[in-house]
Amino acid sequence: MGRRAVLSKRIISCLDVRDGRLAKSVKFVDTRDIGDPAATARNYYEEGIDELVLYDITASSDNRAIMIDVVSAVAARIFIPFSVGGGLRTVEDCTRVRLAGAEKINLNTAAVADPTLLTQASKALGSQAVVLSMDVLAVPASPQTPSGYEIVTHGGRVRTGLDAIAWARKGMELGAGELVVNSIDADGTREGYELRLTRMIAEAVSIPVIASGGGGTPQHLYDVLTEGRADAALVASILHFGEYTIREIKEYLRKRGVKVRMV
């Protein structure tokens, strides 16, 4: 599969929100409250983050709509690309989030339930605004999941039987302009991204791939942006808990030859 021209690699902060508050979990469990999402978003924007993504992490599992007031509060305080996901089930839901200030919408559980939603959203909003977010679990390779990676939904609670590589390709064909590849096995561990998974998907599609899950050090980001062939890396814990600043991460990458946007 052909790849894009080399652009600056992006560092994207992931804001997981539960009940209107910033939250952090490990492997989608042991979730705890760690602050105010709008204030955190503003801080990261001022520090030079390239993009922000906000996930309402219980909207799908609670079968409710996303919290629009939180989306609006974040959007009002930042001036960089902003992506939102969680509980988006229709084009109307997606449009409402766009009107609240998000440039991009993330579809995950709803896209698995109805893949045509990707096409509908792409036609209504443009493919550049549609992100397919994939929660992926490592499984034994089988005829159903030959890659050894399976798509799960509802915040990791539901196994789908879908092979991750096949779903990535289908998502691209249906209109997604970007993929988020979140390894549940690596999520929140801070032990490094799932490089094999990320590379397999990056080599299978021709749209940008964002690696998610496991970032704990600048070295981990370097690994996934080079060996893992990701176009961007999502970070959460290492920023939320003050272990590294955005500037420190970008300086590390720049010094090792990775093209990044410096502020």
Image (cartoon, rainbow, N blue to C red):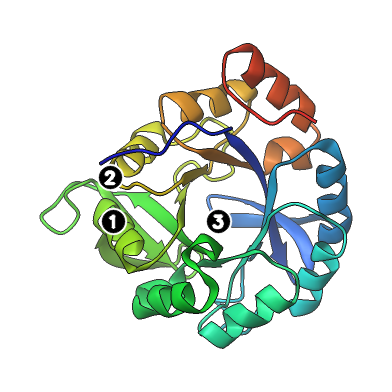
Report helix, strand or loop for mark 1: helix
> Can see residue 243?
no
Quadrant assignment for the C terminus: top right
Residue at x 41%, y 31% (from the top left corner): 228
Report helix, strand or loop for mark 3: loop
Q: Percent x, y for residue 66?
A: 66, 78
Of the residues under marks 3 and 2, which one precedes in the sequence? 3
Residue highlighted by disc 3: 28
Residue type at tag 1: Arg
Disc 3 vs disc 1: which is toward the camera?
1
Residue highlighted by disc 1: 169
In this view, 173 is above or below 11: below
Q: Percent x, y for residue 210?
A: 50, 45
Residue at x 33%, y 68% (from the top left corner): 174
Quadrant assignment for the N terminus: top left
Residue type at tag 2: Ala
Alpha carbon of mark 3 to alpha carbon of mark 1: how far?
A: 25 Å
Of the residues under marks 3 and 1, which one precedes in the sequence? 3
Could you classify mark 3 by the number of other residues whose Cα lies within 10 Å: few (under 14), some (14-19), or many (20 or more)? Answer: some
Front-most of residues 263 and 229: 263
In the figure, residue 256 lies in which quadrant?
A: top right
Left or right: where does residue 92 sit relative to residue 15? left
Residue type at tag 3: Phe
Of the residues under marks 2 and 1, which one precedes in the sequence? 1
Residue highlighted by disc 2: 204
